[in-house]
Amino acid sequence: MKQLIQREREAREIRAREADWEFIKSQPPRLRIALEFYVETGDLYVAAKIAGLTVEEFNELRIRAKIPHVS
């Protein structure tokens, strides 16, 4: 269990470090919140729902925001 928590924390740190925060902050509130949620959780499906986008559309936005997909 500790290893899982450690891996999740490391993944969150990588997403946060690599993200283009200027791009994220420039987005409309709904998209900004969804991108921030993704950075924190890595949950693409829920983040897409928050943004009101399909998973594919949100994944494209994630790439533009330079947030890596860390598993």
Image (cartoon, rainbow, N blue to C red):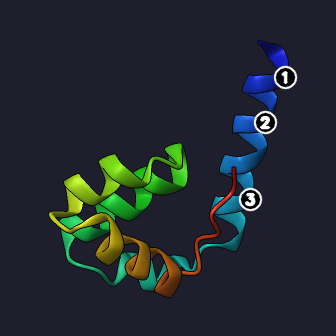
Among all residues in the image, which is located at the extreme left?
A: 52
User: Which mark sits nearer the N-terminus, 3 or 1?
Assistant: 1
Label 1: which residue? 3
Label 2: which residue? 7
Residue 59 placement, left or right of 12:
left
Q: Is residue 20 above or below residue 40?
A: below
Among all residues in the image, which is located at the extreme top?
A: 1
Q: Is residue 27 above or below residue 48?
A: below
Query: What whole-number distance in Å separates the C-alpha atoms at marks 3 and 2?
Result: 11 Å
Number of residues whose C-alpha sits closer than 10 Å to that of mark 3, classed few (under 14), some (14–19) or many (20 or more): some
User: Which mark sits nearer the N-terminus, 3 or 2?
Assistant: 2
Q: Is residue 68 above or below residue 34?
A: below
Residue 22 placement, left or right of 3:
left
Percent across and percent down for residue 31 are 26, 69
Label 3: which residue? 14
Element class at badge 1: helix
Q: Residue at x 35, y 51 (%)?
A: 45
Element class at badge 2: helix
